[in-house]
Amino acid sequence: MKSLVFIGGGNMASCIVAGIAQSNDKSLQITVCDPNQYKLDALRKKFGVNISTSNATVVSEADIVILAVKPQNIRKIILELKSKFKSSVIIISVAAGITANAIKSWLEHPFAIIRAMPNTPSSILTGATGLYADSTVDSKAKKQVELIFNSIGFSCWIEKEDDINAVIALSGSGPAYLFRIFEIMHGVGQELGLEEKIAFELLSQTFSGAAKMINSSPKTATELREQVTSPGGTTERALNVFNNENLEQTFRNAMQEAYGRAEKMSEQFAG
């Protein structure tokens, strides 16, 4: 059994822990470290994980450590713990903007370092995670990390570390974009006369069904959209508004803002 330690028990750590717990992966013994005892007690009660308020007491025996704290706190934590890690440890960072080179410079030891960018649907085993490891990380370490993130959804390896910023803009932040669209459509459905619950159920099923069609159909998203769009019909009218309002450019601007922020954070927190 491998010892998996989370440094930080916030939203992303909770999502990953929830996913692993639901996947019934018995190969991992999970410990979550966080200064917030209330948060730890909630995680232990819900998922049966080990907990600790002291990072130093648990990392020395950890096989895998996931750094799941805010980017501005990672350097301080690494400097405090770098002498505690065993030489074979795999260190995974899920923090935006913290490069592998920055982590290496703080650790001052050739540990296996992997960056992971999961998203919140990991909590229900439908996550999407981009993974990056440089050439010094061996295939065995990569496989162990891959197994963890595959257990909570889909994962893929990114060849260039800079592309992690694109992963952040696409799938890392992606659920929030879709939740915002859901909020808007749900509200408009009620404005048009539907009861709140009926609008919610119809829209929820529509989102779920459309996602399943994209995943299961040999057709592209463009072909699926065209299949719904009858000339002169209601859908065409709605899509014309999107085109006239330049929805594509709005999304492009939003995703480029997310990407640019991730790049700026990489510069800000460089070693």
Image (cartoon, rainbow, N blue to C red):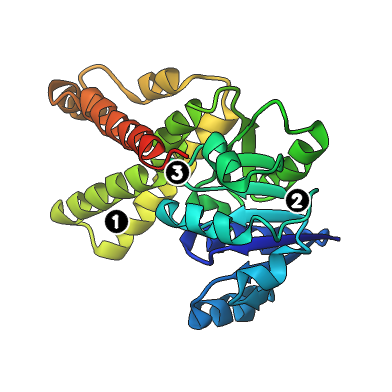
**Residue at 62% across, 81% down:** 45
Q: Quadrant of residue 225?
A: top left
**Residue at 50% across, 77% down:** 39
The quadrant the N terminus occupies is bottom right
Residue 111 placed where, x, y %? Answer: 71, 43
Residue 149 placed where, x, y %? Answer: 66, 46
Residue 236 appears in the figure: no
Point out the residue furthest to the right here: 1
**Real-space Cα separation, disc 2 to disc 3, in angstroms:** 21 Å
Q: Amino acid at mark 2?
A: Val
Q: Label 2: state its secondary structure.
A: loop
For residue 185, above or below residue 270: below
Residue beneath label 1, please?
199
Residue beneath label 3, please?
96
Tag in front: 1 or 3: 3
Residue beneath label 2, please?
89
Q: Nearer the viewer, residue 82 or 162?
A: 82
**Residue at 52% across, 51% down:** 121
Residue 130 placed where, x, y %? Answer: 57, 36
